[in-house]
Image (tube, rainbow, N blue to C red):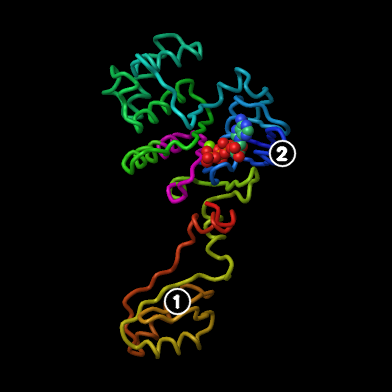
Amino acid sequence: MLRINDLTKNYGSFTAVNHLTLHIPEGELFGFVGPNGAGKTTTIRIVCGLLKASGGTVQIGGSSATLGSKEMKKMIGYVPDFFGVYDNLKVKEYMDFYGSMYSMNSKEIARLSDDLLELVNLTDKKEFYVDTLSRGMKQRLCVARALLHNPQLLILDEPNSGLDPRARVEMKELLKNLHSMGKTIIISSHILSELSEMCSSIGIMDHGKLLTSGGIDTIMHGSMNEPTGGKRIHIRINAGMEVAVQMMKEYPHVVVESVRENEIIINYRGTDEEMSALIGRLIQNQVILTGFYPEEGSLESLFMNLTGGEA
Ligand SMILES: Nc1ncnc2c1ncn2[C@@H]1O[C@H](COP(=O)(O)OP(=O)(O)OP(=O)(O)O)[C@@H](O)[C@H]1O
Ligand SMILES: [Mg+2]
């Protein structure tokens, strides 16, 4: 759906996007992650035709149309990182205004606008002035507006910034919903835990370069297995600590990383079956287990590793 090849953007001698190559297949919900100043907004604005690249190419939906052309703009719905000021414009009028920019007739706009306002849960705000909406509502209105011309690709630049936890959940549900309706979606964000629950794939960018990209499971799994090569497991023990430590030390596939008062942390490389057998043997030997917690590979730790702790 989106093919970015060798994209570069220079501001004078400063390189904001540095030979970026990124391919996003159709139907993905892609998370574009990176610290402040990584070059996410710059990349997005180039893709949307709002900023001219210094080098490289961008192709959307296999079309060879030039970026920023009418044909290209029809394919993209863009939700910018800042919501403009709209004095004296009601929600309904706001939708009409944007609809008319895509040369849709008023009947068509009215029907679509009703459907979209319902989708983003703003039907009861139709007659409200845009400026009186809460930030979360404005963000959802922006999504509705971006969908008016039925674009194949929806790009949202930090749609969650400034939203409270409830509004974030609502935004997440909305995006998941749109994804299940077949839209290809790109969302930029710093909030990694939210992306990991929602996205099908992610790319991590820093200093204008793409550090890694791929399916969320591959990337999460990769992060979990680095750098030790195994899975880290916390085992809580109420009684029989010494026996447990001794058994772990002798057990294949286990490396004891640390022993605390009631907890042993191991690095484990064996199968799940072998792990069950180990737990069984611990219990047979009168070790009282109170907890068993495999560490999840987190996007945060991956991000910190890749960006050298500059999150
Ligand atoms: N018009 C401009 N002139 C000069 N430098 C710019 C301009 N726009 C952006 N930059 C620089 O390009 C870099 C990338 O900025 P960009 O806004 O793309 O980052 P971002 O990843 O979106 O960051 P954030 O998470 O803070 O939104 C930054 O160092 C920024 O200062
Ligand atoms: Mg930005």
**Is residue 15 magenta-colored?**
no
Of 278 and 302, nearer the camera is: 302
Residue that badge 2 annotates: 6
Q: Secondary structure at mark 1?
A: strand
Task: Give the farthest residue toward the left.
Answer: 124
Of 116 and 203, nearer the camera is: 203
Visible in this render: residue 43? no
Magenta residues, as a range?
175-194
Q: Which circle marks residue 76 in the picture?
A: none
Q: Position of residue 199 (x, y in %)?
A: 48, 45
Give the side of residue 94 with respect to residue 227, left or right.
left
Q: Residue at x 44, y 51 (%)?
A: 193
Q: Quadrant of the N terminus?
A: top right
Number of numbered tags placed on the structure image: 2
Q: Position of residue 147 (x, y in %)?
A: 45, 25
Q: Quadrant of residue 95?
A: top left
Q: Residue at x 57, y 22 (%)?
A: 73
Q: Is residue 38 above or below residue 306?
A: above
Give the side of residue 223 with respect to residue 176, left or right.
right
Residue that badge 1 annotates: 265
Amino acid type of the residue tagged 2 in the rendering: Asp
Determine crowd level at label 1: few under 14, some 14-19, many 20+ residues with C-alpha closer than 10 A.
Answer: some
Q: Position of residue 309 (x, y in %)?
A: 55, 56
Indicate which disc, 2 or 1, sits on the residue closer to the N terminus. Answer: 2
Visible in this render: residue 253? yes
Q: Quadrant of residue 114?
A: top left
**Is residue 179 magenta-colored?**
yes
Q: Secondary structure at mark 2?
A: strand
Q: Residue at x 44, y 38 (%)?
A: 180
Amino acid type of the residue tagged 1 in the rendering: Ile
